[in-house]
Amino acid sequence: MNGCDPEQRYDKAFRDWLHELCDVLDFPDPEAPPAWVRKLFESSGRVPPDRFAGIAFERRRTDITEAFTRVAATVHTQTGVDLSAGNPDLALEHPSDEFPIGLVSFVGSPIWSADPPEMYVDIAEAVQSYLADRYRKVWPLCPRHHLGTHPRVAAGRSVWWCNGGAHESEPIFSILSDGRPGRVPSASWVRPAFELSAAGAGAGLGNDGPPVGAVAYDGVQGVPPGRRVT
């Protein structure tokens, strides 16, 4: 080790710290730590796990709240549902033995991912499921195919994916240079559920046809309340 140059010693110290954090907190992934974790090490050195847990929680809380606010604004504009007035909001669980870096959830749907783009997919999925369960709305729809879309990571970005057309409908966010969410999508829209349908296979949200008991949303196959869109 004495023969190593300062950069090698620095990298080893950083890797050792990552493994310590992961052993105690199960976060971050030592093989793929978020960029902010290295910046923290550069500015503050080997932060103890208990203090790091608080820092990670506050960062996740801030990022998730910001992203959720933007999704909620889009939902309000496109569906009329106000997720901030008289509706369930984000629930916070501070770091504990059960949740070492804390937990943020929406109506019982945990936002497990700690960083974008997976974090944005978790948020979008939680809101989408809530709209389907509570309001029987399929949101958002692919403007091209008028089918319900699904949040996923594609080519390293969080997007709304149209299974019927096997293509990206639009990004969940346009990402700013600092990695945080920028504008919200503008082309997505929603239709209300109004009738049950017994449409045949191949007419639904995915390539395999609609699930049993699917709901038609102005002729667009959706998912009945209580069933998560997958």
Image (cartoon, grey):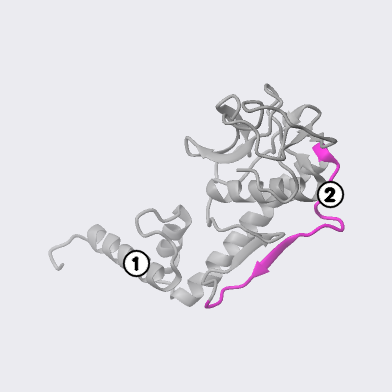
* 209 magenta-colored: no
Q: Which residue is mark 2?
A: 82
Q: CA distance from mark 2 to mark 1?
A: 42 Å
Look at the image and tell me whether residue 184 can be seen.
yes
Q: Give the quadrant of the C terminus.
A: top right
* 85 magenta-colored: yes
Q: 57 or 129: nearer the eye?
A: 129
Q: 76 or 54: nearer the eye?
A: 76
For the stretch drawn in magenta, the main secondary structure is: loop
Residue 108 in the image: above or below residue 115:
below
Q: Which residue is mark 1?
A: 19
The quarter of the picture where residue 58 lies is bottom right
The x, y position of residue 153, in whole percent, is: 52, 40
Q: Residues within 10 Å of mark 2 (few under 14, many from 20)?
A: some
Residue type at numbered disc 1: His
Residue 27 in the image: above or below residue 126:
below
Of labels 2 and 1, earlier in sequence is 1
Q: Please state the extent of the stretch shown in magenta in the rendering.
A: 77-97
Residue type at numbered disc 2: Asp
The quarter of the picture where residue 73 lies is top right
